[in-house]
Amino acid sequence: MTVSTGRDRAFVIVGASLAGAKAAEALREAGHDGPVVLVGEERERPYERPPLSKGYLLGTSEREKIFVHPPQWYAEHDVTLRLGTAVTAVDPAAHTVSLADGERLGYAKLLLTTGSSPRRLPVPGAELAGVHYLRRVEDCERLKAVLRPAARIVVIGAGWIGLETAAAARAAGAEVTVLESAELPLLRVLGREVAEVFAGLHRDHGVDLRFGVQVEALTGGADGVAGVRLADGSTVAADAVVVGIGITPNTALAEAAGLTVDNGVRTDERLRTSDPDVHAAGDVANAFHPLLDKHIRVEHWANAFNQPQTAARAMLGQDVVYDRIPYFFSDQYDLGMEYTGHVEPDGYDRVVFRGDVAGREFIAFWLSGGRVLAGMNVNVWDVTDPIRELVRSGRPVDPAALADPATDLADLADLPDKR
Ligand SMILES: Cc1cc2nc3c(=O)[nH]c(=O)nc-3n(C[C@H](O)[C@H](O)[C@H](O)COP(=O)(O)OP(=O)(O)OC[C@H]3O[C@@H](n4cnc5c(N)ncnc54)[C@H](O)[C@@H]3O)c2cc1C
């Protein structure tokens, strides 16, 4: 059966999460009055994922708080929301998408916001009950049920998801072991200097951190997982295992449709894919960034929140580019941080600290050739504007002034409104 939503005017969005919902909103805000159809395979209306490893997992914030819009918003804005519906194919020549039930929708413009999925643990035993991944709200609810006092929780992977989960598990009174193949947590993202801070944070909160270890198998049986066997032959006992070893972009649809895929769906700075009527945004998009002069794929909330504004306007034919400096945040125990900028692994030559690193109240700057590539404020607030400006300007800065709390960052960034 073919149901056309009005090929000449319909804008179809595939993936009903943060980026998809913000795109629908942006289309309406930009004045598009034709049909907007938002198709998502999850059954929940679009929601935000950060609370799934923080407030909602911790039990400090309510379920209703995770959603991007209230339920009535979609009808009020004449956005057709098709939940529990996977898109199985895109035909760019015919301008149609096929749905799992055989229905086809015509489109004038298509936006792919298909996001990403957790990388699966490729070892024997990984399918045992009690092995958790954390991406969807139901994953969070299953995990929440096992984070209990004295439960033995083993986290595989010391990335953001693994560390935030470790913090939530400790808050619930669980015994937590984190297994990581690298020498430090977050080593590729932060480099050694700042990664040490996160190792110290978790150690101080009673997490058993094991670095440089290889997971060989998960052990257990009909009752579920019982342990994690390491390459050195030792086994770490576990009542539950949480796997956080990274994500991969959901590119299968784009690939099958013949779009250019390379670490995500490749787009230009207008978020347009290799097909002029198909755009991509959020976790799935590997977009050309004009300031950084390269393609980057950003797996963070702010990108999924902001890129759709540009994508929607570009779909409407407006002359817009996406050149925001990447930004993300994390909360673990009493540490809150924001990171502004972009550094490739080993892409910096110096880290400059300002403030009290031991007391975990500081700003770290990653520099290359005297220019600030990124800054991370830890338990220091209201500094992202000057940090962003320092990164954006690409101007060389005096490292001594950067390190000196007496020097106003707004002065260094040459911001007109300093406060
Ligand atoms: C637990 C957790 C905590 C996080 N915490 C932070 C944080 O503290 N700070 C931060 O900056 N970022 C955080 N993130 C990352 C942030 O949530 C993501 O960057 C963001 O969700 C990306 O949004 P998206 O809409 O691009 O993709 P996604 O959220 O991945 O959504 C994509 C949607 O598309 C659907 N879909 C895929 N294929 C199809 C198809 N063929 N048909 C129909 N639907 C499809 C998927 O089911 C999904 O619902 C966190 C992520 C997780 C999982």
Image (cartoon, grey):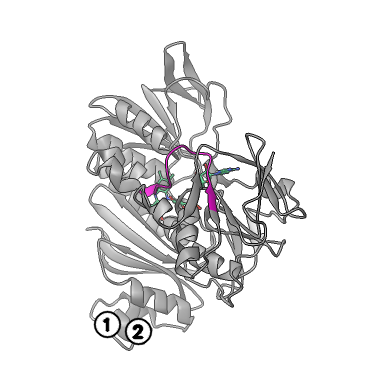
Q: Residues within 10 Å of mark 1 (few under 14, many from 20)?
A: few
* Residue numbers of the magenta segment: 37-50
Membership of 142 in magenta stretch: no
Q: CA distance from mark 1 to mark 2?
A: 8 Å
| Vertical position of residue 26 compared to residue 185: above or below | below
Q: Is residue 322 left or right of residue 74?
A: right
Residue 145 seen anywhere in this rendered image of the structure: yes
Mark 1 = which residue? Answer: 407
Check the image and report above or below for 64 versus 22.
Answer: above
Residue under the point 61% across and 73% down: 317
Q: Residue 42 lies in magenta, yes or no?
A: yes
- The spot of residue 2 in percent (x, y) is 69, 43
Viewer-proximal residue, 25 or 137? 25
What amino acid is at disc 1?
Answer: Thr
> Mark 2 and mark 1 in contact (Cβ < 8 Å)?
yes
Residue type, label 2:
Leu
**Which of the 4 image quarters holds residue 379?**
bottom left
**Left or right of 215 in this view: 69:** left
Secondary structure of residue under mark 1: loop
Position of 11 relative to 395 (above/below) = above
| Displayed quadrant of residue 388 | bottom left
Ranked by sequence position, the earlier of labels 1 and 2 is 1
The picture places residue 265, in percent across and down from the top left corner, at 64, 55
Q: Position of residue 6 (x, y in %)?
A: 64, 56
Q: Residue 55 versus residue 202: which sits nearer the camera?
A: 55
| Secondary structure, magenta segment, majority class | loop
Q: Position of residue 111 (x, y in %)?
A: 59, 57
Name the foreground residue: 107 vs 92.
Answer: 107
Which residue does the numbered mark 2 point to in the structure image? 412
Q: Residue at x 58, y 39 (%)?
A: 86
